[in-house]
Amino acid sequence: MLASRYAKREIASIIEIGAVGGTCTLGLIASAPQVSALITDTSPQFLRIVQRKLASAGIDSRNVRFATLAGEYLGKLNEAGCDAIMIASALHHVWDWRATLRQAARILRPGGVMVIQEPCREGNLMMGMALDVVLSPLWPAAHTLVQEDLRRIRMCRDSIYYLSNSNIFKEGEDKHSFFSQ
């Protein structure tokens, strides 16, 4: 488990914030079945999906608990109550991410670790450029795309470039749905 590489103590408990469909969760639980894990998301439906995925993959989840919890409410958890916090592609969904990180630091035990993975500007730019290639007349299959597909690909590419533009102030509850000012 990545967190154990950086923690200054043995990890006995971990909290995952924003499990969504469980992409990170499955590897996390499989790599450390002895660790007590609290898997959270704002959506009870997503948590049920994660539970089904763990069961169908045959991953031991005896030490796993699930809770509907938004990142903004980490303060409801016990101070110094966990050894590691994982946030994979979820922090950008949190309205006040600074307050969330302060609360996360409060619930970490001394020597604990927080691992955060977020989509990055460079990754978005690479996706945009890949769609530019698909839209190029030099792309072998470009001539086989119908107008509606081309329109959708252009919209997707344009939104990716928009999201990666750090010169535009964006705000909103879900940073995938920014409002420009």
Image (cartoon, rainbow, N blue to C red):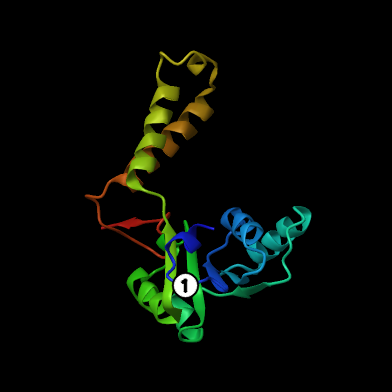
Which residue is under mark 1?
A: 9
Quick check: 101 left or right of 35? Answer: left
Q: What percent of the width, then of the height, locates residue 148?
A: 52, 29
Q: What percent of the width, then of the height, locates residue 36?
A: 62, 73
**Residue name at image x 51 percent, y 77 percent:** 82
Position of the C terminus by quadrant = bottom left
**Residue name at image x 38 percent, y 35 percent:** 126
Q: Amino acid at mark 1?
A: Arg
Quarter of the figure with residue 27? bottom right
Q: What percent of the width, then of the height, locates residue 138?
A: 41, 13
Q: What percent of the width, then of the height, locates residue 89?
A: 47, 56
**Residue name at image x 70 percent, y 64 percent:** 48
**In the depicted structure, whether residue 95 falls above or below residue 125:** below
Quarter of the figure with residue 14? bottom right
Position of the N terminus by quadrant = bottom right
Near-viewer residue (175 or 82) = 82
Callout 1: few (<14), some (14-19), or many (20+) C-alpha neighbours within 10 Å? some
Q: Looking at the image, can residue 102 be seen?
A: yes
Near-viewer residue (124 or 106) = 106
Q: Looking at the image, can residue 174 be seen?
A: no
**In the depicted structure, whether residue 165 falls above or below residue 78:** above
What residue occupies the far left of the structure in this picture? 167
Near-viewer residue (5 or 67) = 5
Quarter of the figure with residue 31? bottom right
Q: Secondary structure at mark 1?
A: loop
